[in-house]
Image: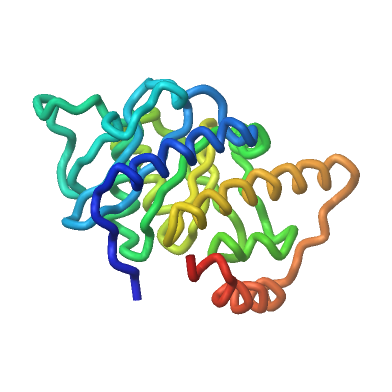
Amino acid sequence: MPRSAPEDSPALRQSIIDACLEMNRSGINQGTSGNISLRIAGGEMLITPSGIPYEAMTPEMIVRMPLDRGPDAGDGQPAPSSEWQFHQALLAAKPEAMAVVHAHPVNCCALAVNHMAIPACHYMVAAFGGHDVPLADYALFGSSELSAHVVATMANREGCLMANHGAICTGDTLARAMWRMAELEHLAATYIRARSIGTPKLLSPAQIDDALAAFAGYGLKQD
């Protein structure tokens, strides 16, 4: 059963900024190319503003908007991230998701520009909800077409690569979504390295099913 969405608060907004800063500190993102959203009570979301350096961001700059319509240019808020459409669509389509994290990690991007998904090369693939980490088709950033591709690809997954673009992860908490993004970048690096020295030996569907069952009770899910 999905957890209740939190109320908007300065602390919740600051948690988004802190996560953005951590993405850049850890090397899984660069500049302002990444963006984060959180579901809040009342059928709304908080999302990072467009083009503002994370170091200059304040809680008041985080944009609040509904999950069922676009931004209101006259509401006095900064413009939301240019990728607000897939954030909104994922939260609307996945009621168990409380957070969406999008970034441009270099190894994920390297696979994405080659239009390569990540197969069952490691049991950590199961952390993303299935037997692979799939690849969403390319469309222009910020477009409704890209949003549709992402939502379709993520229907039964908690993470995906985006062709010629980057990566997205969801989670039932922001901590869980951030953990997945870091793990996805490490998984992408591992797969690339493994391909450079041979042909990776893939796990069987039954072995991934066992890992999926084990991840169902993994500690971070509790918070």
Q: Residue at x 55, y 33 (%)?
A: 104
Quadrant in which the N terminus is drawn? bottom left
Q: Is residue 33 shown left or right of residue 133?
A: left
Viewer-side residue, 129 vs 46: 46
Image coordinates for residue 89, horizontal then vertical, percent: 29, 49
Image coordinates for residue 114, horizontal then vertical, percent: 64, 35
Q: Is residue 120 above or below residue 111?
A: below
Q: Is residue 213 above or below residue 2?
A: below
Image coordinates for residue 23, horizontal then vertical, percent: 55, 36
Q: Residue at x 64, y 36 (%)?
A: 26
Viewer-side residue, 164 vs 179: 179
Image coordinates for residue 44, horizontal then vertical, percent: 21, 50
Q: Is residue 179 shown left or right of residue 38?
A: right
Outermost residue toward the right in this view: 197
> Residue 56's quadrant in the figure?
top left
> Residue 145's quadrant in the figure?
top left
Q: Is residue 118 shown left or right of residue 88?
A: right
Say how many tags the image has: 0
Q: What scheme was used to colour the molecule?
A: rainbow
Q: Is residue 73 shown left or right of residue 15?
A: left
Viewer-side residue, 124 vs 37: 37
Q: Residue at x 43, y 58 (%)?
A: 173
Outermost residue toward the front in this view: 11
Q: Residue at x 41, y 46 (%)?
A: 150
